[in-house]
Amino acid sequence: MAGPTTAERGERRPSRRPKGASGPPSGGPGARPRRLPGLRVLLIGLAAAALAAGVIWLLYGSDWLRVERVRVTGADALTSRQVRAAAEVPMGAPVVSVDTDRIEARLRQRLPRIDSVEVSRSWPRGVTLEVTERRAVLILRKGSRFVEVDREGIRFATVDEAPKDVSRLELTVDGAASLRRFPTDRLVEEAVRVRGQLPAKVAADTRTVAVRSYDYIALELTGDRTVIWGSPEDGEAKARALTALMKGAPKARHFDVSAPTAPAASMS
């Protein structure tokens, strides 16, 4: 007859554990309580919110990151005071809130001499205005004053004295019909175009660019020399022809490259 079973003897069946496991069995009297994952997420969320609030306060509420100085670079004809006044950087405002695009637009509008400008935040308490000014390539007389013209044909400033080493532009257009076809602004642009097409040595020696019409542009050089350029077209060919003429006839005083395939040079 079979003996009594384990259950009948009142004996407890031993728990099965993985081989090599140590410590009290899972679910036993010595088992550690499991941490709630939701509590960990909550704590992380609170820490992130506190950090974000601190950063926002530091950028917008702290006195440490507010505009205290404005630095100007690149100004030459303009003064740093002029640039700062036109920029109207909000002193005392949080550096992060400075509208750099609006300041750039304000500077270009109020100071036409500025060709380009870059406004940047200089942490922790500054703003930098990096200015590039327009440079005159021609000067146009206007009464007793002079108008500066840049490489794009933009008349950007009126000054009391003509800048040194800048060619003078003379507009003596004949006839209203010519002006209707090619208005003054267009002729100024074409004069600048011709000035940019000249060989470097000729450009340096050019004292006057005289414009009578679109088809008649002449140059007055140092040494009582003149060049009939003609229209602004075929500039590269005219520049090569003029260089060859000056090399072949160094004592000539009059050069005509209006027809670059048939250039001419003479003493008078």
Image (cartoon, grey):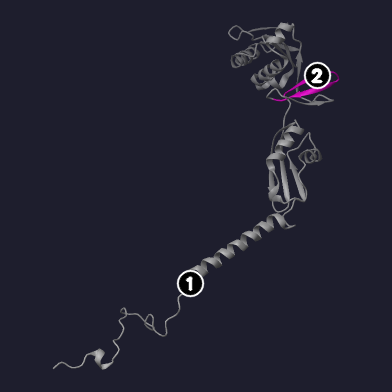
Q: Quadrant of residue 80?
A: top right
Q: Is residue 252 visible?
A: no
x and y, in percent, of residue 43 in the image: 55, 68
Q: Is residue 144 magenta?
A: yes
Residue at image point 75% right, 42% down: 72
Q: Secondary structure at mark 1?
A: loop
Q: Position of residue 224 (x, y in %)?
A: 76, 12
- Which residue corresponds to mark 1? 36
The amino acid sitting under disc 1 is Leu
Residue at 55%, 65% in the rendered image? 44
Q: Is residue 43 left or right of residue 215?
A: left
Which of the numbered marks, if any, corresponds to residue 141? 2
Q: Which quarter of the rendered picture does the C terminus lie within?
A: top right
Mark 2 or mark 1: whose residue is earlier in sequence: 1
In the depicted structure, whether residue 141 falls above or below residue 129: above
Front position in the image: 183 or 143: 183
Please say if the residues under marks 2 and 1 sit with CB atoms less than 8 Å apart: no
Which region is colored magenta? 137-150
Q: Nearer the viewer, residue 248 or 73?
A: 73
Above or below, 256 relative to 58: above
Query: Is residue 14 at all visible to an observer of this figure?
Result: yes
| In this rendering, the label closer to the viewer, 2 or 1 | 1
What is the CA distance from the residue labelled 2 to the residue labelled 1? Answer: 85 Å
Instruction: Locate the N terminus by quadrant.
Output: bottom left
At label 2, counting other C-alpha atoms closer than 10 Å, the crowd grade (few under 14, some 14-19, many 20 or more) is: some
Toward the viewer: 37 or 89?
37
Residue 101's place in the image compared with 46, above or below, is: above
* Secondary structure at numbered mark 2: strand
Queried whether the magenta region covers residue 151, the answer comes back as no
Could you classify mark 1 by the number of other residues whose Cα lies within 10 Å: few (under 14), some (14-19), or many (20 or more)?
Answer: few
Residue 140 placement (x, y as % from top left): 78, 19
